[in-house]
Image (cartoon, grey):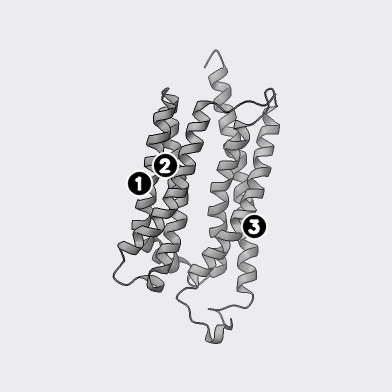
Amino acid sequence: MARSPSPLHWSVGLAALVGAVAGSFLGSVVPIYAPAAHPLLGGDAAIYVGTLLGVIAGAAAGSIGAFVLARLGRPALGAVVGSLAGLAAGAASGAFAESAAADWVRAFSGDPLAAAFFGGAIGGTFVGIAAGVGVLVFQRQGTPVKEVVRFGGMVGALGGVLAGLGGGSIGATLAQSTTYCPNAAYNGAACPPGLLQGAILLGVWGGGLLGAIAGLLTAEVLTFLAARRRSPDA
């Protein structure tokens, strides 16, 4: 029989959801009202990056804050505090979005395909972690640990592929944001042919690879910790 989510699971899930949604909003709004002196693309890059960072930071801060308080027996308070932590993390992401966009351009402006791979890998990693947690929460009682871990890796890989589509496109687009390609025709080292197709492909590979690894490791670690808690010798 499937294990039902506990108040801890509901608390963490709710806080992560609120943190992700509200964090993405604040991450996109803060750069508009706190523009840099010389913003990239007139500030569009910061809004774009702030939205993505807000999702990641908001979900992470919300889930961690809720988990700590829920483990102390206060799941309702954990959901509220975690949600507020997610909002704060999203706003902070917006404040640093411009510098993050500039750093990404400086690091990858000469190699947009590498930016696509790493962008996909970053997205895949976070989705893989979420997949590993979700698989463990909804596992059936008595399911062998190896099956749980393998399934976590598979779900993480699938989610990572989807995240890699966006991460790869975003990474390459941002890396090319300050590069001029005459008549939108990609040519030469700065504007290689097949850039968009290559970016999507490398993003999918990076997202799938890191999603699988993150899903496997997350499921492995959490099942190990759960077994330690159930063990009378722990």
> In which quadrant of the rendered view does residue 192 lie?
bottom right
Mark 1 or mark 3: whose residue is earlier in sequence:
1
Coordinates of residue 225 in the picture (x, y in percent): 54, 27
Give the Cα distance between marks 1 and 2: 9 Å
Query: Measuring 64% from the left and 58% from the top, which residue is drawn there?
Result: 204
Question: Height in image: 119 above or below 55?
Answer: below
- Residue 117 showing in the rendered view: no
Mark 1 or mark 2: whose residue is earlier in sequence:
2
Q: Around disc 2, counting alpha carbons within 10 Å, would you say few (fewer than 14), some (14 to 19), or many (20 or more)?
A: many
Mark 2 or mark 3: whose residue is earlier in sequence:
2
Q: Around disc 1, counting alpha carbons within 10 Å, would you say few (fewer than 14), some (14 to 19), or many (20 or more)?
A: many
- Residue corresponding to mark 2: 61
> In which quadrant of the rendered view does residue 102 lie?
bottom left
Identity of the amino acid at label 2? Ala
Query: Measuring 56% from the left and 83% from the top, which residue is drawn there?
Result: 184
Identity of the amino acid at label 3? Trp
Task: Point out which mark residue 205 bears.
Answer: 3
Say whether residue 131 is left or right of residue 100. right
> In which quadrant of the rendered view does residue 15 lie?
top left
Give the Cα distance between marks 1 and 3: 33 Å
Front residue (pair 179, 137): 137
- Residue corresponding to mark 1: 88
Q: Are marks 1 and 2 in contact (CB under 8 Å)?
A: yes
Coordinates of residue 118 in the picture (x, y in percent): 54, 59
